[in-house]
Structures are given as C-alpha cells and as structure tokens.
Image (cartoon, rainbow, N blue to C red):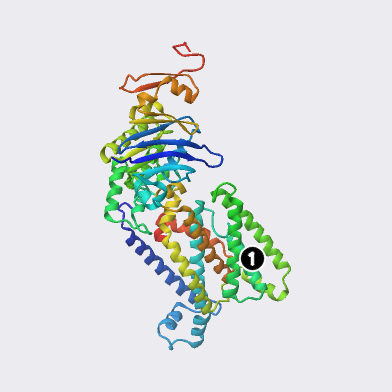
C-alpha cells in the first residue's frame, strides 16, 4: 500500500520562528499519529507545512505519493483538512454556516451548496455531537464546543488527512477525552489519517498509534508510545525530572512529573 | 440566521428583491424632492405618461434630479461595498476606505487632476485611481514590516496615511488659485449636484464590473473572515484574493471620489446595518 503521507528530509525555516531540520517519516493509511515535544520545538510548523500553509525550504512532502507542492490549493483542501491552534472566536457565523464552509473546496466560486453538501454538513455536525447547537453563533460557544465545530468543519472537507494543532489545550477533562474519542472514531470509521499536535503526553500515550517526539526541530524519537515514552528520552527532551510507569487504567505508559525537592521517590 | 436554512440562491434572490424594491422607492422619493418642489404624483406623471405632465417639471426631473439620484445610488452602493470588503479583509468593524486613507489618496489625486484642469470623468478619475493606488501601496509597505497584511498594522498605517492625506489636501488648497478653489471645496464636501447623465453612465461602466468582481469573491471573503490559515487550508489563495479585492475596491472608491468628493460615513455604516438584517454571509450582500 502506498504511503498516505511521506515526509522526506523536510526542512522549514522562516524568520524568528522555530525551524525544522531534516525530518523524515511516513504514515500509511488510517493512523492516529501524535506529535509531541517541548514548546518551540517546531510542532506547529510541522503541521502547517503538512497543510501546505508554509513554504518548505528543503526536502519534500508527499500526499499519496504526489509532491505537495504540485497539488493545487483547492485539491489539497479536499485531501487535507487543518484545525488551527486558536481559532477565531468572534466569528459571526453560526455553527451550521461555518461547518458548511468546509464544503467550499468542492464547490464553484460562489460556493453555492447542493443537497449532498448540506447532508454531509449535517452528518459532520451529528458526528461531533453539535446538533443542539447548530443554530448558535461560533462566538457564543464554549471552548470545547467551538473546537468540535471546527473539527466538524474539517470533517466536512472529507479529507484523507486531518491535522489538528493542540485541539485539547485549555479544555476540561471530559472535552479532552471526547475530542480524542472523536478522532479515534474518525480514523476507524472513515480510514482518515489523523495527525495531532499535543502537549498532553498521557493523553497521547493512550490514543496514539505512533508518537513523534520533536526536539529543536529534529526527530528525537518516533514509534509506538511504549517505545517513545521512557524516562531517558523524555527527561532528555524536556529537561525535567519525571517517572514513567504502566498506567493502572490500561496497557499504555504513564508519565508522572517529579516536583522540585523530590516526591515520594527521592532517588535521583 | 433562521431555524430552517433556506437554500442560498433563494436567499440571494429574496434579499435582492427586497433591496431592489427599497431602491426603487428611494429613487422615486429622490425624484420627488427638490428645491423647486414637486410631488410623487408629478413624478408618476412624468415617468409613465410622457407628454401629459408639466414640461418644466419633466425637465427638472429628467435633466437634474434623475442623474443626481442615479449617481447617489451608484455612489452609495460603491462606498458600502468598499466598506464591506475592507471590514472583511481586515476583520475590523471600523475599517472602510475613508478611514484607511484610500479615499484620501484618491482625493489628492483628484485635486491634482482638477488643478491640472482635467475633465471630471476620464481625467480626474485616472489621477484619483493613481492616488488611491499610491496610498494603498504605501499602507502595505508600511504595515508589512514582518508579514504582509498584519491586520492591525494595516489599519494603523491607514489612519496615519489618512491624516497625512488631509494635510496634503490642505496644502494643495492653500496653493490653489481662486478660480478652481471654489470648485475643489464644493467637490470635497461631497457633491452630487454637478452630475450629468453621461457621467453617470461612465461611472456605472467602471463600477458595475467592480461590483461583479466583488460578488464573485464573496464566498472567499466568508472564508477569509475565519482567518487566513483557515481560508488557505480550505483552498483559498488568500494573498491573491486580498490583492484583487483591495485593488478593485480602490478603483471603485477612486472613481466614486473623483465624481463626488469625500463621502465617508456610508461605507462604515451600511455594511453593519445589512449584517444586522441578513446575517454575516457575504454572498447575499454582494
């Protein structure tokens, strides 16, 4: 099977911002791929580059074996959807209107939607559990609801690859798990490749098929959570003391931070 | 906007119909009022039973009021659309061509045109367009220290340029000879009275294509309103759209300004009024 996404020796540089160096990895079909790493390590730059929003200074990104730079913007929008880190919160549109905009890569210049488009939007709204809010303005929603509305808009694009930049940041526990479950379902039911940037390593360990640890714009580790999440790698990447054990909730690793002056376990 | 979403074409048609009716009503009202008096029935008589009405009345209505009213309608449409475009692109409710200095630049160009003794419509129109393009370019250069079109920087430099334009206009006024001074001042105050029907025709010939370009871009403006990255990830070439819209709007504003001076308020308020009534979607508004 051909790779859904292949990144080959990718480098990105732009003034006064993190830079990516010589990144190579690939994803085959339905996969939940989570990018972790310290602040400023280039995670956002990576997803923006994958979304075709940033110029690439070296190497190549292939979407289904076609170089990204050869795919025109509109076609790319039918294959790759992007949910930004902070989304415009004063948006004057209603949930329904905004979700429907996800159809615009399939429509003509005026974006006149047909019946199928409206059906797809309705399904996306139902999928994200926003039926009861579809007439509300985006600006009047809570953070978690707004994030789901943006996810519904991205789903409406019917992409093969969906990119999310810290979708669970600043959300409460229930909303965090809800969004992770949504993405897992999307992968399973639609075969979508999900690439997510996250700061929550424990959440990432629970859901990711594979993790990519970025440090200073380079790949520090890439593989299944059990392989990437270990004390040595993480302590080296984040420069803080931590403990990794097996989660009591299931077969995935758990990271615990150790406060200054030691915790219960005081050996170094 | 409504509980059951009606389809977009129906929506556009409905909004257009209502607004068109309002426009016709406003035009008739405009024709009926003037310093020589008149009534709606007189207008009716002149419009629909030609010959039977008072000849003098007919001349006043057709030769003087009709071009003026048509001009006012066109100018209003152009300024409101200009405001709409700028508010969408800059995501700022205060943005409009007047505040951004684009009108000011057009005014400088137009005044230079008048001083040079050019005719109102091709001549002054061209100098006004050059003036507004120059200010637009200046605004973009000033505000693009880091990235092109950082919203607040654009607005701030626009306000600066606008102040500067006012100063230049004052300077130009102060060096102007008496003969054209009166002309310029009258024009600056926002003058619709000097219009003749072929001027209105020429103005329409420039404005209507601009309206169409903007209408075609209305859905992209919706997407841009979500944020440039969002719009780009949904297949919009944000830079190209922004550039096309800014230049089109400048052209529209500068021919309008060259024809009837600096009128600002309309461009700021009408888009907000319309949004209150029909919601934020740009497509029916176009």
Q: Residue drawn 32% across and 42% down?
A: A130
Report the front residue among B19 and B128: B128
Q: B101 and B63: which one is in front?
A: B101
Indicate the position of residue B243 as horizontal and vertical percent values.
51, 58
Q: Can residue A53 be seen in this view?
A: yes
Q: Is mark 1 on a helix, strand or loop?
A: helix
Residue B198 in the image: above or below residue B10: below
Host chain of mark 1: B
Image location (x, y in percent) of residue B14: 35, 63
| Residue A264 point in image, percent of width and height | 44, 12
Q: Position of residue B28 (x, y in %)?
A: 45, 74
Q: In which quarter of the image is the N terminus of chain A?
A: top left
**Residue drawn at point x = 56 percent, y = 48 percent:** B152
Q: Is residue A166 visible?
A: no
Q: In this view, does A152 lie above or below A118?
A: above
Which of B105 and B174 lies nearest the eye of the viewer? Answer: B105
User: Which residue is label 1 attached to?
Assistant: B108
Residue A238 as seen in the image, left or right of residue A3: right
The number of callouts visible is 1
Q: Which residue is drawn at 29% across and 52% down?
A: A118
Task: Give the vertical position of A167 relative to B32 (above or below).
Answer: above
Specify few, some or many for label 1: CA neighbours under 10 Å numbering under 14, 14-19, or 20 or more. Answer: many
């Amino acid at each position: 099977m051909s790779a859904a996404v292949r990144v080959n020796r990718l480098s990105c540089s732009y003034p006064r911002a993190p830079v990516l160096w010589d990144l190579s990895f690939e994803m085959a079909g339905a996969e939940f791929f989570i990018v972790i790493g310290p602040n400023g390590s280039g995670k956002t730059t990576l997803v923006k580059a994958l979304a075709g929003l940033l110029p690439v200074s070296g190497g190549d990104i292939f979407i289904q074996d076609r170089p990204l730079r050869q795919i025109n913007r509109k076609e790319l929008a039918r294959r790759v959807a992007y949910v930004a880190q902070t989304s415009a919160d004063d948006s004057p549109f209603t949930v329904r209107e905004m979700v429907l905009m996800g159809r615009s890569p399939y429509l003509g210049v005026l974006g006149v939607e047909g019946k199928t488009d409206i059906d797809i939007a309705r399904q996306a709204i139902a999928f994200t559990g926003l039926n009861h809010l579809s007439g509300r303005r985006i600006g009047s929603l809570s953070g978690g609801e707004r994030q789901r509305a943006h996810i519904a808009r991205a789903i409406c694009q019917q992409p093969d690859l969906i990119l999310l930049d810290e979708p669970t940041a600043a959300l409460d526990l229930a909303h965090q798990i809800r969004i992770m479950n949504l993405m897992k379902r999307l992968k399973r039911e639609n075969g979508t490749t999900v690439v997510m940037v996250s700061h929550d390593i424990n959440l990432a360990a629970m859901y990711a098929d594979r993790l990519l640890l970025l440090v200073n714009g380079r790949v520090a580790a890439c593989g299944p959570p059990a392989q990437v999440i270990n004390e040595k790698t993480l302590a080296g990447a984040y420069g803080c003391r931590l403990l990794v054990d097996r989660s009591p909730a299931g077969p995935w690793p758990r990271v615990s931070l150790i406060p200054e002056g030691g915790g219960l376990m005081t050996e170094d | 906007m409504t509980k059951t979403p009606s389809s977009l074409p129906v929506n556009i048609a409905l909004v257009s119909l209502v607004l068109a009716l309002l426009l016709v009503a406003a035009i008739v009202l405009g024709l009926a009022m003037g310093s020589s008096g008149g009534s709606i029935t007189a207008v009716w008589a002149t419009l629909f039973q030609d010959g039977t009405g008072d000849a003098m009345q007919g001349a006043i209505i057709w030769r003087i009021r009709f071009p003026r009213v048509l001009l006012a309608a066109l100018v209003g449409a152009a300024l409101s659309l200009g405001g709409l475009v700028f508010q969408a692109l800059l995501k700022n409710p205060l943005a409009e061509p007047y505040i951004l200095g684009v009108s000011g630049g057009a005014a400088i160009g137009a005044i230079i045109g008048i001083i040079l003794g050019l005719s109102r419509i091709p001549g002054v129109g061209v100098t006004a367009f050059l003036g507004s393009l120059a200010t637009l370019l200046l605004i973009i250069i000033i505000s693009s220290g880091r990235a092109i079109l950082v919203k607040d920087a654009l607005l701030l430099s626009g306000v600066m340029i606008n102040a500067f334009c006012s100063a230049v206009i004052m300077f130009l006024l102060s060096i102007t000879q008496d003969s054209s001074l009166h002309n310029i001042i009258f024009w600056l105050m926002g003058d619709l009275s000097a219009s003749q029907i072929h001027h209105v025709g020429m103005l329409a010939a420039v404005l209507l294509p601009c309206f169409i370009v903007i209408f075609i871009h209305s859905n992209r403006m919706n997407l841009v309103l979500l944020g440039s990255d969002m719009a780009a990830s949904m297949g919009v070439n944000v830079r190209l759209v922004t550039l096309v819209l800014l230049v089109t709007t400048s052209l529209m504003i500068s021919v309008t300004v060259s024809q009837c001076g600096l009128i600002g308020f309309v461009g700021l308020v009408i888009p907000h009024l319309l949004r209150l009534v029909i919601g934020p979607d740009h497509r029916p508004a176009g």
